[in-house]
């Protein structure tokens, strides 16, 4: 099967020309959208058409736009706190966070396992094969939304590959025919300041415009006690903007364009060194730092990172155009085109540490102390680096352009019994130049001075057997994806429906890596520091030090579903789905593993959806699932004995896993003024088999172990919430008190052979007090607090204690609180 870009472009042009024709016979043919029959009904687009949530035979969690604002959700990590079963891998900065659902997570240098979609378009790729970026939901997307829909389980038919775990749909608010808007300001602890504004303008009877801006800043909650580097880590500073234009070109033709922009510049995640083993590696150097952290009265939210000019700079923009032609009551043709760019520069400390001169080796055996003193003489204003990565001046860590085009056909047949859709999809992700990462090898002794390029560093090797180095990694990766799909639902009876869908996908990926290193001389001089030697090729790279790789694959994915409605408000369903995550070129890996193949999942799910009315109304949903994952993409660290070769993170198809669990959620309206919500998720994962390759001269370190659980897979997670409407006069406005208790069990973040590699369990309470229409005026006032009990949590752990001699962790947010004021104008924008 061959699907070419020219074919798609020709089809798109044909549809566009047809849409320009005035189809009078279809003047009133805009398809009927479902409407909420009561306050408990939610309209979603989980199957690419608008349906009631309770009519969709998929496990779906929904957060409304109003709740996003109430819960202060501004990025992926915030969203995951409020959706049981959803976790994130932050990857050093929130702008690079990706989602994990039901045990499916994105490893370093793989494609996403959970797709993120904004306005029906997949999130931009970052392209970097050093520290990956993109594929997630940054702050540009998290304001002025209609809702967020979290689809659980493979979505490979309608949304394509790389959705083996599910998909997260971000639905923006469309322009309306009212002149309205709002201005909102928030202030909180850690000097949090946020201002947001939205304006909706009906330009005329057929054109509507909506624009919005969101600006937020906050001091980091992790204090840096080192003499160099930023004063705090994990701060926030971004500006995001969006403009939407809706044009009714004809009674049956609609054109919808969205432009988004986001710029973020802040300090990255700050790792905290908290444990050491003085008998291994650099452990004795970490001892003073750990002792200071554990001293009485020490700030638990502190770190010591001697990294000059640490930063995370991200810039992203995207343009989306959707052209819809309602041909008749039974046919709609839609074309969705997008173009985006993602750019990121990072300077981060991967392992943490503040190992500054002078050094003490007291308490060690004389031979060990003498060897360390020889390797690390006490030279003023120097530090021992513990693996850092930075973007040199003029370079980019991630720098990628992305183009997508999708042509959709949707309709009904057989007297309305058959609802069908199909389409063609094309995606091209291309590098804009090279993505470059400069890394300083662990154990290198350097001067503590700001630097922009490798030439600025002044260091010395600590080991004559293996010279310390600067590793220069330059890569670019290109992706092309083409697919055709079709799905249909047939009503066998009024109560029984059968759905079947098929998608055929072709993927192609190619990449190029240039791997060089610069060594620092070893010297017997007690004080000498040097500029790095000229660059040489790493082991396995020859000539111009480059190595190319390419791979392609063809896969079919499908879904088969039956849904039965024995009662008006009760539905049971069963689904079998096949999904896959694409293989790709991985030029930054070890040369023998510079490509990897797709992985495949078979998913089986059964569920119940029910709602009830009366004096006590609400809904209850339940889903159970079993997944079998084959040819699994596992991450391995390859540590070579060759001093001219750096460590290489590689992806190898070497695993097989099984995953099962259940999810349930409920809403109960106990009275007009009081309702409760609850959700719970149980997840059981196991890596059934894993093959660790044996390579001469290389130590292979796995991030997963056979028989262990998968990373980022908490066994239990859930929430319990209650909302109480206070009895105040109608003229005073509407006052609501909302309390939410969130819990999540501890989960593994890497190989389970190291028991410390776990995120801590979460038990947190959030409170919100909302006073809307204060004194019958268009003013809304809110007070909010998260993690009210100030629980100390650990998000991830490096697990290096018995390898490098120390361990570092990333900390979760402490208690956050503040106030928010919104002023509405015009006809008012409701939540």
Image (spheres, grey):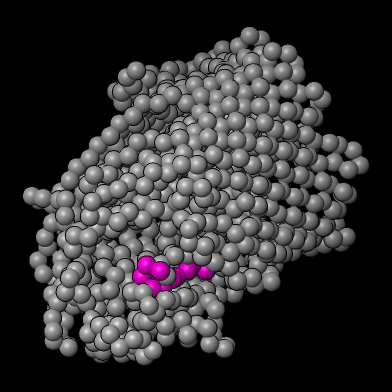
Q: Is residue 181 in view from this perspective? A: no
Q: Quadrant of the N terminus?
A: top left
Q: Which residues are magenta?
A: 802-812
Q: In front: 392, or 111? A: 111
Q: Is residue 70 left or right of residue 144?
A: right
Q: In front: 275, or 60? A: 275
- Residue 350's place in the image compared with 549, above or below, is below
Q: Is residue 392 in view from this perspective? A: yes
Query: Whole-percent x and y of residue 424?
Result: 42, 24
Q: In front: 412, or 712? A: 712
Q: In front: 290, or 560? A: 290
Query: Whole-percent x and y of residue 158?
Result: 51, 29
- What residue appears at the point 56 percent right and 36 percent down from the top-left corner? 627
Residue farthest toward the top in the current orientation of the protein: 414
- What residue appears at the point 36 percent right and 51 percent down from the top-left corner? 636
Asked if residue 783 is among those painted magenta in the image, a careful observer would answer no
């Amino acid at each position: 099967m061959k699907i070419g870009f020219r074919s798609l472009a020709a089809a798109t042009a044909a549809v566009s020309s047809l849409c320009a024709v005035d189809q009078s016979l279809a003047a009133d043919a805009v398809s009927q959208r479902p409407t909420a029959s009561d306050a408990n009904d939610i309209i979603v687009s989980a199957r690419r058409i608008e349906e009631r949530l309770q009519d969709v035979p998929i496990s779906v969690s929904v957060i409304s736009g109003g709740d996003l604002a109430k819960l202060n959700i501004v990025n992926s990590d915030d969203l995951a706190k409020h959706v049981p079963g959803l976790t994130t891998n932050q990857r050093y900065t929130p702008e690079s966070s990706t989602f994990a659902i039901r045990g499916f997570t994105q490893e370093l240098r793989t494609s996403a396992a959970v797709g993120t979609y904004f306005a029906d378009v997949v999130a931009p790729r970052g392209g970097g094969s050093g520290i990956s970026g993109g594929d997630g939901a940054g702050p540009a997307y998290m304001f002025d939304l209609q809702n967020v829909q979290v689809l659980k389980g493979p979505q490979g038919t309608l949304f394509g590959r790389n959705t083996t775990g599910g998909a997260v749909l971000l639905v923006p608010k469309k322009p309306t025919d009212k002149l309205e808007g709002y201005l909102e300001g928030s202030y909180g602890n850690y000097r949090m300041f946020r201002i947001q504004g939205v304006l909706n303008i009906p330009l005329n009877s057929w054109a509507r415009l909506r624009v919005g801006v969101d600006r937020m800043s906050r001091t980091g909650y992790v204090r840096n006690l080192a003499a160099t580097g930023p004063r705090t880590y994990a701060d926030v500073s971004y500006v995001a903007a969006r403009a939407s234009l809706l044009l009714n070109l004809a009674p049956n033709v609609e054109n919808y364009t969205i432009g988004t922009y986001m710029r973020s510049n802040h300090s990255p995640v700050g790792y905290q060194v908290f444990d050491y083993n003085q008998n291994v590696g650099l452990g004795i150097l970490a001892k003073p730092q750990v002792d200071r952290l554990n001293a009485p009265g020490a700030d638990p939210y502190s770190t010591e990172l001697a990294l000059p000019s640490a930063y995370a700079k991200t810039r992203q923009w995207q343009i989306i155009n959707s052209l819809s032609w309602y041909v008749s009551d039974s046919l709609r043709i839609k074309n969705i085109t997008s173009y985006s760019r993602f750019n990121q520069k990072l300077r981060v400390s991967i392992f943490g540490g503040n190992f500054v001169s002078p050094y003490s080796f007291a308490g060690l055996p004389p031979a060990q102390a003498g060897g360390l003193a020889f390797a690390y003489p006490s030279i003023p204003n120097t530090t021992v680096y513990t693996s850092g990565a930075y973007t040199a001046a003029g370079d980019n860590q991630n720098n990628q352009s992305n183009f997508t085009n999708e042509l959709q056909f949707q309709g009904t047949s057989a007297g309305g019994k058959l609802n069908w859709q199909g389409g063609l999809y094309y995606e091209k992700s291309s590098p804009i130049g090279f993505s470059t990462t400069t890394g300083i090898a662990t154990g290198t002794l350097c001067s503590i001075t700001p630097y922009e390029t490798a030439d600025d560093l002044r260091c010395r090797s600590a080991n004559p057997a293996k010279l310390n180095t600067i590793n220069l990694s330059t890569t670019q990766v290109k992706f092309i994806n083409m697919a055709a799909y079709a799905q249909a639902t047939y009503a066998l009876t009024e109560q029984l429906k059968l759905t079947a869908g098929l998608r055929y996908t072709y993927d192609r990926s190619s990449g190029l890596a240039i791997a060089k290193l610069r060594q620092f001389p070893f010297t017997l001089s007690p004080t000498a520091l040097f500029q790095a030697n000229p660059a040489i090729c790493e082991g396995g790279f020859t000539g111009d030090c480059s190595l190319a790789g390419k791979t392609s694959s063809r896969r079919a994915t499908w879904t088969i579903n039956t849904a039965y409605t024995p009662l008006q408000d009760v539905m049971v369903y069963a689904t079998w789905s096949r999904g896959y995550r694409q293989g790709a070129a991985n030029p930054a890996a070890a040369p023998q593993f510079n490509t990897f193949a797709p992985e495949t999942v078979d998913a089986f799910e059964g569920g119940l959806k029910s709602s009830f009315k009366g004096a006590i109304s609400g809904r209850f949903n339940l889903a159970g699932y079993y997944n079998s994952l084959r040819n699994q993409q596992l991450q391995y660290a390859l540590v070579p004995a060759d001093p001219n070769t750096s460590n290489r993170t590689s992806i190898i198809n070497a695993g097989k896993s099984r995953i099962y669990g259940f999810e349930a959620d409920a809403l109960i309206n106990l009275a007009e003024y009081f309702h409760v919500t609850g959700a719970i998720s149980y997840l059981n994962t196991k890596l059934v088999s894993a093959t660790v390759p044996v390579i001469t001269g290389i130590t292979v370190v796995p991030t997963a172990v056979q028989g262990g659980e998968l990373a980022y897979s908490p066994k239990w997670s859930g929430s319990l919430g209650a909302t109480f409407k206070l009895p105040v006069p109608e003229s005073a406005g509407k006052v609501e008190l909302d309390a939410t208790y969130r819990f999540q069990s501890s989960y593994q973040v890497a190989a389970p052979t190291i028991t410390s590699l776990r995120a801590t369990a979460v038990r947190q309470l959030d409170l919100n007090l909302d006073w809307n229409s204060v004194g019958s005026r268009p003013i809304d006032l809110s007070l909010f607090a998260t993690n009210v009990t100030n629980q100390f949590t650990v998000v991830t752990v490096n697990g290096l204690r018995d390898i490098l001699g120390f361990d570092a962790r990333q900390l979760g947010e402490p208690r956050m609180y503040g106030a928010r004021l919104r002023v509405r104008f015009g006809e008012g924008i409701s939540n």
